[in-house]
Image: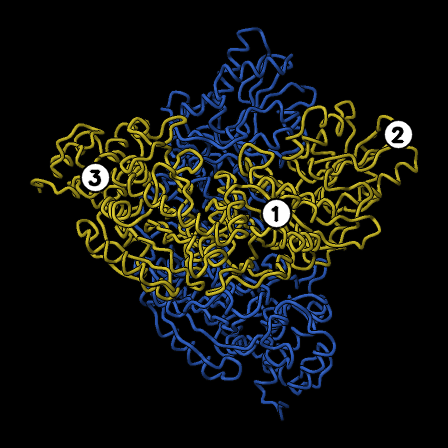
Chain colours: A yellow, B blue
Amino acid sequence: MVVAKQSLEELCINSIRFLAIDAVEKAKSGHPGLPMGAAPMAFVLWDRIMRFNPKNPGWFNRDRFVLSAGHGCMLQYAMLYLTGYDGVTLDDIKNFRQWESKTPGHPENFMTPGVEITTGPLGQGIANAVGLAIAEAHLAAKYNKPDCTLVDHYTYVILGDGCNMEGISGEASSLAGHLGLGKIIALYDDNHISIDGSTDIAFTEDVSKRFEAYNWHVQHVPDGNTNLEAITEAIEKAKAVTDKPSMIKVTTTIGFGSPNKGNTAGIHGAALGGDEVKATRENLGWEHEPFHVPDDALNHMRKAVERGESSEAEWNQTLATYRSKYAEEAAEFERFLSGKLPEGWEKALPTYTPADKALATRKNSEMTLNALAPVVPELIGGSADLTHSNLTELKVSGNFQKGQYENRNLRFGVREHAMGAICNGIALHEAGLVPYGATFLVFTDYMRNAIRLSALSQAGVIFVMTHDSVGLGEDGPTHQPVEHVASLRMIPDLIVYRPADGNETSGAYKVALERAKGIGSSQKQTTLLALTRQGLPNLEGSSIENAAKGAYVLSDSDGTPDIILIGTGSEVSLCVDAADKLRGEGKKVRVVSMPSWEIFEDQDASYKESVLPKAVTKRVSVEAGTTFGWGRYAGSEENAIGVNRFGASAPGGEIMKKLGFTVDHVVSKAKEVLG
Amino acid sequence: MVVAKQSLEELCINSIRFLAIDAVEKAKSGHPGLPMGAAPMAFVLWDRIMRFNPKNPGWFNRDRFVLSAGHGCMLQYAMLYLTGYDGVTLDDIKNFRQWESKTPGHPENFMTPGVEITTGPLGQGIANAVGLAIAEAHLAAKYNKPDCTLVDHYTYVILGDGCNMEGISGEASSLAGHLGLGKIIALYDDNHISIDGSTDIAFTEDVSKRFEAYNWHVQHVPDGNTNLEAITEAIEKAKAVTDKPSMIKVTTTIGFGSPNKGNTAGIHGAALGGDEVKATRENLGWEHEPFHVPDDALNHMRKAVERGESSEAEWNQTLATYRSKYAEEAAEFERFLSGKLPEGWEKALPTYTPADKALATRKNSEMTLNALAPVVPELIGGSADLTHSNLTELKVSGNFQKGQYENRNLRFGVREHAMGAICNGIALHEAGLVPYGATFLVFTDYMRNAIRLSALSQAGVIFVMTHDSVGLGEDGPTHQPVEHVASLRMIPDLIVYRPADGNETSGAYKVALERAKGIGSSQKQTTLLALTRQGLPNLEGSSIENAAKGAYVLSDSDGTPDIILIGTGSEVSLCVDAADKLRGEGKKVRVVSMPSWEIFEDQDASYKESVLPKAVTKRVSVEAGTTFGWGRYAGSEENAIGVNRFGASAPGGEIMKKLGFTVDHVVSKAKEVLG
């Protein structure tokens, strides 16, 4: 097939294809197949459908785009370049997949202006998109007025067979259908090829029927390779359906245009190679040098700049009107966008004294969330079907449901992985919302990739994880975290807090909210709270300020201590009691409460030395989790009291005793270390 | 509603209900709602449908049962007791959820004879069931003869709304439909209640339609509370459909019989309380003491013993016939069941010398798998759509597909979480199969709970994880493991291997296969291999025997070393080169290769001291992953060279250099430590 004179649209679409082909060829690495096949739908989206301003990628009311099939990132980079984003130049494209380039191997929101969402791990993107759409629906319900529509944009997604095989996409899509999120429009690049070959070998379900079962509006474009009108019409129809999310199955040919590798897995994730690039150029009638975009195509695509500036100007007018009519709402909305927290918000944080009743830190968390809810209206979240165990309900609000999007209690269902990605999406909507998601700590295992991506993409989420140790009791080892707290501490840029009482829980929320906004840090950060099921006494010496330093001296003897007992969470009070006993025997004992390793590491050297003086080498740590890694503070893992086995089903108090979490054991360990 | 004289069946069913009610009441903890609602379907299954032998829970040809909704475990314990399993007595039931009891808070296969599968984390069980059915289908295709059916049993599952919300159940069910696994019969306890209340708040999809989309045979029993005939007929119909898995939606009332708490979330996960227990007794006309089962009911249910013994005797006759006709196959089949590996199998393991070409350890793994495949016919497995990246294809076999179940290459699709659980199911079928599952190491985050459950339930799986560090290159931080190896080492009872070359890869497989069978260990163990994308030289001094000790001295200077360099995987050769350089400068240097922490810890104290003498405190560790925890062997994390940040997209060699994995850096670190 030799194409005769190409239409302007063909010229644009082939420009996308060859930018991808040439970039992958130069890098000798990457995924050309998807961009070649999905170029037509991308062209339609960017040229005909989406509202965005290349000169201000952060314009609030832009449509959001998520490339859930993130390996096809050259598609996205090509679109950003062609439509005139300054952040992606032709040089950047030539630098595809190179050190510190703006065109990394998968889309990274923190590297590339115009990329909303970091994708690559399959299925995450469509779930992030549900979060983006929840954010839009919530803000629209909250701020729009009958005479002034301030919030009004769509979330577009391109996803592939791989995304649709992943469970997380099913979880998120089921919830999106339940919620009737009509502004999600997902284009399913149905090319029948995954890495292992034809989808015939592992994926023969009826995807459309499945999405109908989820209560989505489903359409099919049988010829996604050339029928731009059909794609356009399907998207317009999808926009007209406002009470259901839309899935458009767009049947395409992976690597369209490549005569020998198109429609094969061979073009999914490898450069075409010189001969096949040549053959593809011939086949598509493309006579241009590598990386050359014909002027006609570039000029046409760059009209996006003018469209975008005009869209934004129009919206700015709307905002001005809104401001004049609804000053209070506008002020809040603009504060949201500013990334600031409300003045004096932290005064709402509950404080406690030792005279206050012993409570589980999950209960302290509930009190904190509910104290903050009226003051920090950007808090929105919920639990994966454990609301009354995680204690995450905001009493000032109803449930976020179809037609009730102004509400702030999200009901995720038993869908932890989707919950994590949805929270990431809400945060990465970048309108100032601070999402939280809750489940049992052990089930971080179901959502670990979403937690990792939350940290990597600097989302700013709060994960509220309760039932944080074997102390949860009867549910047994399948429900008892052992390695979880430590394994989460390892995730770069993630903050983990395991507070010991009410004040520390408030302190943890203080840090979590600030970091979610990027306050006190060079970037937004996600925090994970590990909270107890069981009650804990309020400690003498704990405070919000202390907890916000990550670790601090809770109690001390005069002079240089003989030994330091370091505890976290439910084990700090054991350290306190053990210290009393040891002091009674004439030992000089310091107790350090260490709710957050990461925040403690963030403190300056002199503070760290003041808490854990290098000279005091006799140390014992106590934490009802693995001892793995405790050598860092205890000197050696052998000085750590912990749990290096699976738990067991029995009442929590009994398990804790059986596994050595008793004052006597801490005392005897301390004596052993003292020698 | 006061029930008049109860039929024998009602008596049996109410016995189940009250055993659950009374056990939860006594423990003041547990989940009575499911057993009360699902008692009728359980009665039908155990009394009318399933083949099993209570006096020999391990009888090979039994039907398998999985309680995917594991919180309802009192249902299962009640059935085991009532049908006459010696492992669960009335005293055990009275001891529900107590320390070391046989009736823990969720079903644990390692605690309770008759429990096939450890469940609790939702959605896992239905995916395990797919593994059980794959095992059955494979063995049936392999051993059955036109005149002798040796392998022929069903896999029954009870799952709930929670299981159906979890993505893993969708992944597994999609694959089961693709594979046409007709012997899975899943009963969906459709009670419209999850922990947070009515499923109306989060789960309104059409589950039946979704399963039809997966290509399952779907039926609905609208009255699962009383219509035993309808349940029975539906199961019989499901059995008649041999080319599709079957899902029977059985609509029930959670907590059936409880007048005030039935059909509410209040009965899902808490004891009824004295008053409601009384009201329920009255409502169901149950005049018996707590824990009393009427003789009529017990006598009836115990007929299972006779049925079971007769079923097993019949099958033993079949086996005898088979043995006489097909001696060779019978010998292999019986070896499978014995848990032994074939005589001399380890001779097939490839060995290498430094003269051999540098290969990626994923390539060594491919060679090992293919060398073992003809010798160890119980190896069966595959990849989650990364076959040619993970290099896991067995060239002696075709793909395991509908009608080709004799094959050993499983095509999991992009379904990592289901893959993990399916592998667990294949292993826990307990017929000697050794399953393996493969993906990129970073995607252990998608399947972490399945890996943990594999370790906890002593399954004996091999997880083959490739692309094990930032060294994988261009795919960037979303694909680059950093914390993964360390975070997996923390999981109790899991063995992690990160081999440095070909011999170590063979050694890792040696240990993995032995431990999968429980050889060299008190229990079956699961092993995870972390393998490189990039080529590694074959080291002087490596061997299968050395690798099988977890860590060993790879090279040494004469006399007591000044410093020990400890490396794993791709970083060992860096240590070797750095040692050469340091020795050139007169230092005495030992190089220790440490492919497996867990196996090294298993060695006796004198061996450990011989490798890492306590007296030699100057140590440096080198591993392209987090330094978290390396203090254990390096003395302090500060002596560890590693990666404590997210990776980046660039060619692998460049990233490794940028992040400090160079001989010069190891040398300078060593000098710094030497002081």
- Give me the residue at 53% from left, 7% from top: B584
The residue wearing badge 1 is B522
| Residue placed most toward the observer, B402 or A362 | A362
Q: Secondary structure at mark 2?
A: loop
When asked about the image quadrant of residue B104, the answer is bottom right
Cα distance in 3D space between marks 1 and 2: 50 Å
Q: Secondary structure at mark 3?
A: helix
Cα distance in 3D space between marks 2 and 3: 77 Å
Kindly indicate whether the residues beneath marks 2 and 3 are on one polypeptide chain. Answer: yes
| Residue placed most toward the observer, B479 or B398 | B479
The residue wearing badge 3 is A300
Along the horizontal axis of the image, is A115 left or right of A371?
left
Mark 2 belongs to which subunit?
A
The residue wearing badge 2 is A558
Mark 1 belongs to which subunit?
B
Q: Is residue B457 above or below residue A586?
A: below
Q: Amino acid at mark 2?
A: Asp
Along the horizontal axis of the image, is B205 left or right of A538?
left
- Give me the residue at 92% from left, 38% from top: A584
Q: Amino acid at mark 1?
A: Ser
Quarter in which the N terminus of chain A is drawn: top left
Q: Residue furthest top?
A: B585
Q: Is residue B545 above or below residue A204?
A: above
- Percent of width and height locating residue B106: 61, 61
- Percent of width and height locating residue B383: 38, 46
| 1 or 2: mark nearer the eye | 2
- Percent of width and height locating residue A393: 61, 59
Q: How many marks?
A: 3
Residue B439 visible in image: no
